[in-house]
Amino acid sequence: MTQEEIFERIKEAIVGILIRDGDKIDEDQIEKNSNLEDLNIDSFDRVEITIALEEEFGLDSGEIRDEEAVRWQKVEDIIQCISERKSFSNV
């Protein structure tokens, strides 16, 4: 899986959670360098995103620690987190 594929799956998870919370957002608004605060992602959203990504990428529950998720500033931080846990090829 490439970094771009990881990014696309992360975007889908973020959009799904934010729309469910009543926010209006489109995947096109999310870029790798998007700041999470600018996307109105709060601490509760981070927890939901963490759980969704653990499920999406086949990680063990709790593998992404809360302490790590609170340090995410940009979408690219989430991409890095997932990439570090999974050995995806860059093909």
Image (spheres, rainbow, N blue to C red):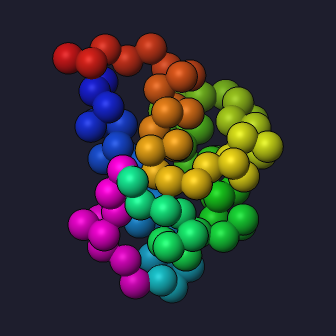
Q: Is residue 11 visible?
A: no
Q: Is residue 75 above or below residue 64?
A: below
Q: Residue at x 26, y 37 (%)?
A: 4
Query: Which segment is the magenta one?
Result: 24-32
Q: Quadrant of residue 64?
A: top right
Where is residue 37? Give x, y as percent: 57, 70
Q: Quadrant of the N terminus?
A: top left
Is 28 magenta? The answer is yes
In the rendered structure, the answer to whether residue 5 lies left or right of residue 49 reads left
In the rendered structure, the answer to whether residue 42 lies left or right of residue 31 reads right
Q: Is residue 55 visible?
A: yes
Magenta segment, prevailing SS (helix, strand or loop): loop
Is 64 magenta? The answer is no
Q: Is residue 59 above or below residue 33?
A: above
Which residue is most to the right? 67
Where is residue 58? Give x, y as percent: 53, 29
In the rendered structure, the answer to whether residue 23 lies left or right of residue 68 reads left
Q: Residue at x 55, y 76 (%)?
A: 40
Closest to the observer: 31 or 17? 31
Where is residue 12? Give x, y as percent: 37, 56
